[in-house]
Image (cartoon, grey):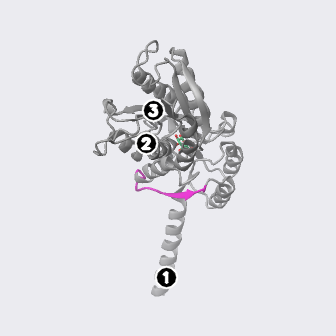
Protein backbone atom coordinates (compact mmCIF):
# COMPACT_ATOMS: atom_id res chain seq x y z
CA UNK A 1 0.00 0.00 0.00
CA UNK A 2 2.70 2.36 1.06
CA UNK A 3 4.70 1.47 -2.02
CA UNK A 4 1.67 2.13 -4.21
CA UNK A 5 1.32 5.57 -2.69
CA UNK A 6 4.91 6.38 -3.45
CA UNK A 7 4.49 5.23 -7.05
CA UNK A 8 1.37 7.35 -7.38
CA UNK A 9 3.16 10.34 -5.92
CA UNK A 10 6.03 9.88 -8.35
CA UNK A 11 3.59 9.70 -11.26
CA UNK A 12 1.88 12.91 -10.11
CA UNK A 13 5.22 14.69 -9.69
CA UNK A 14 6.37 13.53 -13.12
CA UNK A 15 3.07 14.66 -14.62
CA UNK A 16 3.16 18.08 -12.97
CA UNK A 17 6.82 18.45 -13.85
CA UNK A 18 6.02 17.58 -17.45
CA UNK A 19 3.19 20.09 -17.59
CA UNK A 20 5.30 22.78 -16.01
CA UNK A 21 8.19 22.45 -18.40
CA UNK A 22 5.81 22.23 -21.35
CA UNK A 23 3.98 25.39 -20.42
CA UNK A 24 7.05 27.26 -19.39
CA UNK A 25 8.98 27.00 -22.62
CA UNK A 26 8.75 30.03 -24.87
CA UNK A 27 9.68 29.29 -28.49
CA UNK A 28 11.88 31.83 -30.25
CA UNK A 29 11.84 31.42 -34.02
CA UNK A 30 14.70 33.13 -35.83
CA UNK A 31 14.34 33.63 -39.59
CA UNK A 32 17.91 32.48 -40.29
CA UNK A 33 20.69 31.61 -37.86
CA UNK A 34 23.25 32.26 -40.58
CA UNK A 35 22.48 36.00 -40.33
CA UNK A 36 25.18 37.39 -37.98
CA UNK A 37 23.02 40.23 -36.69
CA UNK A 38 20.17 37.87 -35.82
CA UNK A 39 22.61 35.47 -34.22
CA UNK A 40 23.72 38.18 -31.79
CA UNK A 41 20.12 39.29 -31.30
CA UNK A 42 19.08 35.69 -30.46
CA UNK A 43 21.93 35.30 -27.97
CA UNK A 44 21.03 38.60 -26.32
CA UNK A 45 17.49 37.31 -25.76
CA UNK A 46 18.61 33.88 -24.51
CA UNK A 47 21.14 35.40 -22.09
CA UNK A 48 18.45 37.49 -20.45
CA UNK A 49 15.94 34.69 -19.84
CA UNK A 50 14.79 34.80 -16.21
CA UNK A 51 14.61 31.64 -14.05
CA UNK A 52 10.80 31.44 -14.12
CA UNK A 53 10.68 30.18 -17.71
CA UNK A 54 12.97 29.03 -20.48
CA UNK A 55 13.30 30.07 -24.10
CA UNK A 56 14.03 27.61 -26.86
CA UNK A 57 15.41 28.92 -30.14
CA UNK A 58 14.59 27.48 -33.57
CA UNK A 59 16.36 28.21 -36.85
CA UNK A 60 13.85 28.70 -39.69
CA UNK A 61 16.72 28.46 -42.20
CA UNK A 62 15.35 31.32 -44.26
CA UNK A 63 12.28 29.27 -45.23
CA UNK A 64 8.74 30.34 -44.37
CA UNK A 65 7.66 26.74 -45.02
CA UNK A 66 10.03 25.42 -42.35
CA UNK A 67 8.98 28.19 -39.98
CA UNK A 68 5.28 27.43 -40.51
CA UNK A 69 5.89 23.77 -39.72
CA UNK A 70 7.65 24.73 -36.49
CA UNK A 71 4.80 27.05 -35.56
CA UNK A 72 2.11 24.49 -36.27
CA UNK A 73 3.82 21.86 -34.11
CA UNK A 74 4.73 24.26 -31.32
CA UNK A 75 1.21 25.67 -31.07
CA UNK A 76 -0.03 22.16 -30.24
CA UNK A 77 2.10 22.35 -27.10
CA UNK A 78 0.32 25.54 -26.04
CA UNK A 79 3.30 27.71 -25.18
CA UNK A 80 2.53 30.76 -23.02
CA UNK A 81 3.71 33.09 -25.79
CA UNK A 82 5.75 32.84 -29.00
CA UNK A 83 8.54 35.16 -30.14
CA UNK A 84 8.74 35.19 -33.92
CA UNK A 85 11.19 36.74 -36.36
CA UNK A 86 9.19 36.01 -39.53
CA UNK A 87 11.00 34.85 -42.64
CA UNK A 88 8.51 36.63 -44.87
CA UNK A 89 6.87 39.51 -43.08
CA UNK A 90 3.73 38.87 -45.13
CA UNK A 91 3.61 35.42 -43.52
CA UNK A 92 2.51 37.11 -40.29
CA UNK A 93 -1.13 37.11 -41.39
CA UNK A 94 -1.44 33.31 -41.27
CA UNK A 95 0.67 33.09 -38.11
CA UNK A 96 -1.59 35.52 -36.24
CA UNK A 97 -4.76 33.69 -37.23
CA UNK A 98 -3.34 30.33 -36.12
CA UNK A 99 -2.06 31.68 -32.81
CA UNK A 100 -5.33 33.45 -32.11
CA UNK A 101 -7.26 30.21 -32.63
CA UNK A 102 -5.39 28.57 -29.74
CA UNK A 103 -4.99 31.76 -27.73
CA UNK A 104 -1.18 31.99 -27.81
CA UNK A 105 0.09 35.62 -27.81
CA UNK A 106 2.77 36.48 -30.38
CA UNK A 107 5.67 38.94 -30.18
CA UNK A 108 7.06 39.62 -33.64
CA UNK A 109 10.59 40.95 -33.81
CA UNK A 110 12.93 42.59 -36.36
CA UNK A 111 10.87 41.97 -39.51
CA UNK A 112 7.86 44.20 -39.21
CA UNK A 113 4.52 42.68 -40.21
CA UNK A 114 1.96 44.82 -42.00
CA UNK A 115 0.00 47.04 -39.64
CA UNK A 116 -3.30 45.38 -40.53
CA UNK A 117 -1.88 41.96 -39.63
CA UNK A 118 -0.71 43.19 -36.24
CA UNK A 119 -4.19 44.53 -35.57
CA UNK A 120 -5.90 41.21 -36.34
CA UNK A 121 -5.72 40.41 -32.62
CA UNK A 122 -4.95 42.40 -29.45
CA UNK A 123 -2.42 39.81 -28.21
CA UNK A 124 0.04 40.51 -31.02
CA UNK A 125 3.05 42.78 -30.53
CA UNK A 126 6.05 44.06 -32.48
CA UNK A 127 9.47 44.95 -31.05
CA UNK A 128 11.81 46.62 -33.52
CA UNK A 129 13.84 49.66 -34.47
CA UNK A 130 12.56 52.48 -36.70
CA UNK A 131 14.31 51.95 -40.05
CA UNK A 132 14.07 55.62 -40.97
CA UNK A 133 16.14 56.65 -37.99
CA UNK A 134 19.01 54.29 -38.91
CA UNK A 135 19.26 55.96 -42.31
CA UNK A 136 19.15 59.45 -40.81
CA UNK A 137 22.02 58.57 -38.49
CA UNK A 138 23.95 56.89 -41.31
CA UNK A 139 23.58 60.04 -43.41
CA UNK A 140 24.84 62.14 -40.48
CA UNK A 141 28.00 60.01 -40.32
CA UNK A 142 28.51 60.59 -44.06
CA UNK A 143 27.89 64.35 -43.84
CA UNK A 144 30.29 64.73 -40.94
CA UNK A 145 32.93 62.84 -42.90
CA UNK A 146 32.58 64.78 -46.16
CA UNK A 147 32.18 68.18 -44.50
CA UNK A 148 30.61 71.31 -45.98
CA UNK A 149 28.25 70.34 -48.81
CA UNK A 150 29.42 73.34 -50.88
CA UNK A 151 33.08 72.50 -50.49
CA UNK A 152 33.55 68.80 -49.81
CA UNK A 153 36.79 67.91 -48.10
CA UNK A 154 39.60 65.52 -49.02
CA UNK A 155 37.26 62.53 -49.29
CA UNK A 156 35.85 64.00 -52.50
CA UNK A 157 38.69 62.30 -54.30
CA UNK A 158 38.14 63.84 -57.76
CA UNK A 159 37.20 67.26 -56.37
CA UNK A 160 33.95 67.56 -58.37
CA UNK A 161 31.89 68.29 -55.23
CA UNK A 162 29.75 65.23 -55.90
CA UNK A 163 29.95 62.03 -53.82
CA UNK A 164 30.25 58.94 -56.02
CA UNK A 165 28.55 56.03 -54.26
CA UNK A 166 28.02 52.30 -54.50
CA UNK A 167 25.03 51.30 -52.40
CA UNK A 168 24.59 47.74 -51.14
CA UNK A 169 20.97 47.01 -50.48
CA UNK A 170 19.50 44.34 -48.17
CA UNK A 171 16.74 41.94 -49.03
CA UNK A 172 14.19 43.36 -51.47
CA UNK A 173 10.86 44.08 -49.77
CA UNK A 174 12.33 44.09 -46.23
CA UNK A 175 11.20 47.26 -44.44
CA UNK A 176 14.77 48.06 -43.38
CA UNK A 177 16.26 47.64 -46.86
CA UNK A 178 13.64 49.76 -48.61
CA UNK A 179 13.51 52.55 -46.04
CA UNK A 180 17.25 52.74 -45.35
CA UNK A 181 18.01 53.03 -49.06
CA UNK A 182 15.43 55.69 -49.74
CA UNK A 183 15.98 57.77 -46.61
CA UNK A 184 19.79 57.88 -46.67
CA UNK A 185 19.66 59.31 -50.21
CA UNK A 186 16.89 61.78 -49.37
CA UNK A 187 18.68 63.00 -46.26
CA UNK A 188 21.91 63.67 -48.15
CA UNK A 189 20.07 65.49 -50.90
CA UNK A 190 17.86 67.59 -48.64
CA UNK A 191 20.97 68.63 -46.75
CA UNK A 192 22.48 69.95 -49.95
CA UNK A 193 24.86 67.09 -50.83
CA UNK A 194 25.14 66.07 -54.44
CA UNK A 195 25.35 62.31 -54.75
CA UNK A 196 25.97 60.22 -57.83
CA UNK A 197 24.82 56.64 -57.39
CA UNK A 198 27.17 54.55 -59.48
CA UNK A 199 25.09 51.48 -58.79
CA UNK A 200 22.65 50.01 -56.27
CA UNK A 201 23.26 46.29 -55.82
CA UNK A 202 21.06 43.92 -53.81
CA UNK A 203 23.23 41.69 -51.60
CA UNK A 204 20.50 40.25 -49.33
CA UNK A 205 22.13 41.24 -46.03
CA UNK A 206 24.98 38.78 -46.70
CA UNK A 207 28.76 39.18 -46.42
CA UNK A 208 29.35 36.71 -49.27
CA UNK A 209 27.02 38.58 -51.62
CA UNK A 210 28.48 41.94 -50.63
CA UNK A 211 31.94 40.59 -51.44
CA UNK A 212 30.91 39.06 -54.76
CA UNK A 213 29.05 42.21 -55.82
CA UNK A 214 32.05 44.40 -55.06
CA UNK A 215 34.49 42.08 -56.82
CA UNK A 216 32.40 42.57 -59.95
CA UNK A 217 31.73 46.27 -59.50
CA UNK A 218 35.17 47.51 -58.49
CA UNK A 219 36.84 46.84 -61.87
CA UNK A 220 34.05 48.89 -63.49
CA UNK A 221 33.45 51.71 -60.99
CA UNK A 222 36.46 51.53 -58.68
CA UNK A 223 38.25 54.57 -60.08
CA UNK A 224 35.28 56.83 -59.44
CA UNK A 225 34.26 55.33 -56.10
CA UNK A 226 34.30 57.63 -53.05
CA UNK A 227 31.89 55.94 -50.65
CA UNK A 228 30.19 52.60 -50.02
CA UNK A 229 26.85 52.84 -48.24
CA UNK A 230 25.62 49.51 -46.99
CA UNK A 231 22.18 48.75 -45.55
CA UNK A 232 23.90 46.55 -42.95
CA UNK A 233 27.29 45.60 -41.50
CA UNK A 234 27.46 42.07 -42.91
CA UNK A 235 27.38 43.36 -46.52
CA UNK A 236 29.78 46.18 -45.57
CA UNK A 237 32.22 43.55 -44.28
CA UNK A 238 31.96 41.73 -47.64
CA UNK A 239 32.66 45.03 -49.41
CA UNK A 240 35.71 45.60 -47.21
CA UNK A 241 37.04 42.11 -48.02
CA UNK A 242 36.85 42.94 -51.73
CA UNK A 243 38.35 46.41 -51.21
CA UNK A 244 41.24 44.83 -49.31
CA UNK A 245 41.80 42.15 -51.91
CA UNK A 246 41.87 44.70 -54.73
CA UNK A 247 44.14 46.99 -52.69
CA UNK A 248 41.82 49.93 -52.19
CA UNK A 249 42.85 49.55 -48.56
CA UNK A 250 46.58 49.36 -47.99
CA UNK A 251 48.12 48.93 -44.58
CA UNK A 252 51.47 50.32 -45.77
CA UNK A 253 53.25 50.06 -42.42
CA UNK A 254 51.69 46.69 -41.57
CA UNK A 255 50.52 47.81 -38.16
CA UNK A 256 47.07 46.20 -38.60
CA UNK A 257 45.43 49.60 -38.67
CA UNK A 258 44.39 51.78 -41.62
CA UNK A 259 45.50 55.35 -40.99
CA UNK A 260 43.02 57.57 -42.84
CA UNK A 261 45.60 60.38 -43.16
CA UNK A 262 48.41 58.39 -44.68
CA UNK A 263 47.15 55.08 -46.08
CA UNK A 264 44.83 54.32 -49.03
CA UNK A 265 41.23 53.70 -47.95
CA UNK A 266 37.62 54.10 -49.06
CA UNK A 267 34.93 55.01 -46.54
CA UNK A 268 32.41 52.22 -45.98
CA UNK A 269 29.44 52.78 -43.68
CA UNK A 270 27.16 50.08 -42.33
CA UNK A 271 24.29 49.59 -39.92
CA UNK A 272 23.87 47.11 -36.98
CA UNK A 273 27.01 47.36 -34.85
CA UNK A 274 27.76 43.63 -34.87
CA UNK A 275 30.96 42.61 -33.05
CA UNK A 276 33.01 42.10 -36.20
CA UNK A 277 32.00 45.50 -37.52
CA UNK A 278 33.03 47.26 -34.32
CA UNK A 279 36.41 45.56 -34.55
CA UNK A 280 36.78 46.75 -38.15
CA UNK A 281 36.00 50.28 -37.03
CA UNK A 282 38.76 50.04 -34.43
CA UNK A 283 41.20 48.93 -37.13
CA UNK A 284 40.11 51.70 -39.52
CA UNK A 285 38.58 49.49 -42.23
CA UNK A 286 34.93 50.28 -41.55
CA UNK A 287 34.40 54.01 -41.22
CA UNK A 288 31.24 53.92 -39.16
CA UNK A 289 28.03 52.12 -38.32
CA UNK A 290 24.68 52.69 -36.68
CA UNK A 291 23.95 50.45 -33.73
CA UNK A 292 20.76 48.45 -34.17
CA UNK A 293 20.41 47.96 -30.44
CA UNK A 294 19.54 44.28 -30.04
CA UNK A 295 20.53 44.35 -26.35
CA UNK A 296 17.78 46.83 -25.50
CA UNK A 297 15.36 45.08 -27.85
CA UNK A 298 16.14 41.79 -26.09
CA UNK A 299 15.41 43.43 -22.73
CA UNK A 300 12.11 44.78 -24.02
CA UNK A 301 11.17 41.35 -25.41
CA UNK A 302 11.97 39.66 -22.10
CA UNK A 303 10.00 42.24 -20.10
CA UNK A 304 7.01 41.87 -22.39
CA UNK A 305 7.20 38.06 -22.32
CA UNK A 306 7.41 38.05 -18.52
CA UNK A 307 4.44 40.40 -18.20
CA UNK A 308 2.35 38.21 -20.52
CA UNK A 309 3.30 35.03 -18.63
CA UNK A 310 2.53 36.60 -15.25
CA UNK A 311 -0.71 38.07 -16.50
CA UNK A 312 0.53 41.59 -15.66
CA UNK A 313 -0.57 44.73 -17.47
CA UNK A 314 1.79 44.91 -20.45
CA UNK A 315 1.78 48.68 -20.21
CA UNK A 316 3.63 48.61 -16.90
CA UNK A 317 6.94 47.39 -18.36
CA UNK A 318 9.81 49.86 -18.58
CA UNK A 319 9.59 50.22 -22.38
CA UNK A 320 6.82 52.29 -23.92
CA UNK A 321 4.24 50.10 -25.60
CA UNK A 322 2.61 52.26 -28.24
CA UNK A 323 -1.04 51.55 -28.86
CA UNK A 324 -0.68 48.25 -27.00
CA UNK A 325 1.30 46.99 -29.99
CA UNK A 326 4.68 48.53 -30.78
CA UNK A 327 7.92 48.87 -28.85
CA UNK A 328 10.50 50.97 -30.74
CA UNK A 329 14.13 50.94 -29.70
CA UNK A 330 16.30 53.73 -31.04
CA UNK A 331 19.54 53.41 -33.01
CA UNK A 332 22.91 54.99 -32.09
CA UNK A 333 25.76 56.32 -34.23
CA UNK A 334 29.17 54.70 -33.90
CA UNK A 335 32.39 56.02 -35.44
CA UNK A 336 35.95 55.81 -34.19
CA UNK A 337 36.40 59.46 -33.18
CA UNK A 338 33.35 59.47 -30.97
CA UNK A 339 34.25 56.33 -29.02
C1 LIG B 1 17.99 44.12 -40.11
C2 LIG B 1 19.48 44.05 -39.96
C3 LIG B 1 20.07 43.16 -41.03
C4 LIG B 1 19.39 41.81 -41.02
C5 LIG B 1 17.90 41.95 -41.06
C6 LIG B 1 17.20 40.62 -40.92
O1 LIG B 1 17.43 44.89 -39.10
O2 LIG B 1 20.01 45.34 -40.10
O3 LIG B 1 21.45 42.99 -40.82
O4 LIG B 1 19.78 41.10 -39.89
O5 LIG B 1 17.45 42.81 -40.04
O6 LIG B 1 15.83 40.75 -40.88
Q: Secondary structure at mark 2?
A: loop
Please tell me which of labels 2 and 1 falls first in the chain.
1
In this rendering, does residue 73 appear at all? Answer: yes
Bounds of the magenta segment: 48-61
Please tell me which of labels 3 and 1 falls first in the chain.
1
Q: Secondary structure at mark 3?
A: loop
Task: Answer above or below: position of 95 versus 187.
Answer: below
Q: CA distance from mark 2 to mark 1?
A: 73 Å
Closer mark to the observer between disc 2 and disc 1: 2
Which quadrant holds residue 285?
top left
Residue 176 in the image, given as x and y percentages of width and height: 57, 35
Residue 303 in the image, given as x and y percentages of width and height: 45, 43
**In the rendered structure, does residue 55 fall within the stretch colored magenta?**
yes
Residue at position x 60%, y 27% in the image = 182
Q: Which mark is residue 331?
A: 3
Residue 139 in the image, given as x and y percentages of width and height: 48, 25
Residue that carries the numbered disc 1 in the rendered image: 7
Which quadrant holds residue 334?
top left
Residue at position x 52%, y 77% in the image = 11
In this rendering, does residue 325 appear at all? Answer: no
Closer mark to the observer between disc 3 and disc 1: 3
Residue that carries the numbered disc 2 in the rendered image: 247
* Apparent side of residue 244 relative to residue 65 in the rendered image (left or right): left
Q: Is mark 1 within 8 Å of ligand 1?
A: no
Q: CA distance from mark 3 to mark 2?
A: 32 Å
In this orientation, which residue lies closer to the viewer: 296 or 4? 296
The answer to the question of whether label 2 and label 1 lie on touching residues, with beta carbons closer than 8 A, is no
Task: Answer above or below: position of 304 versus 332.
Answer: below
Amino acid sequence: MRRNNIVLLLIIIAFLGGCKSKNNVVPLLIYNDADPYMEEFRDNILERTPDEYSIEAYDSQNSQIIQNEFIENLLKEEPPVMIINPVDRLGAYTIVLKAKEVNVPVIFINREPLEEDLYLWDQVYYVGAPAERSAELQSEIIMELFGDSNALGVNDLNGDNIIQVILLKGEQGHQDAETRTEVVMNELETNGYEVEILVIEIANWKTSEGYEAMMELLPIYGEQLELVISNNDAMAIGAIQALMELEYFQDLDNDGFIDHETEPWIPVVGIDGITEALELITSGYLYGTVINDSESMAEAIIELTTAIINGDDVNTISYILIDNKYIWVDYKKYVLDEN
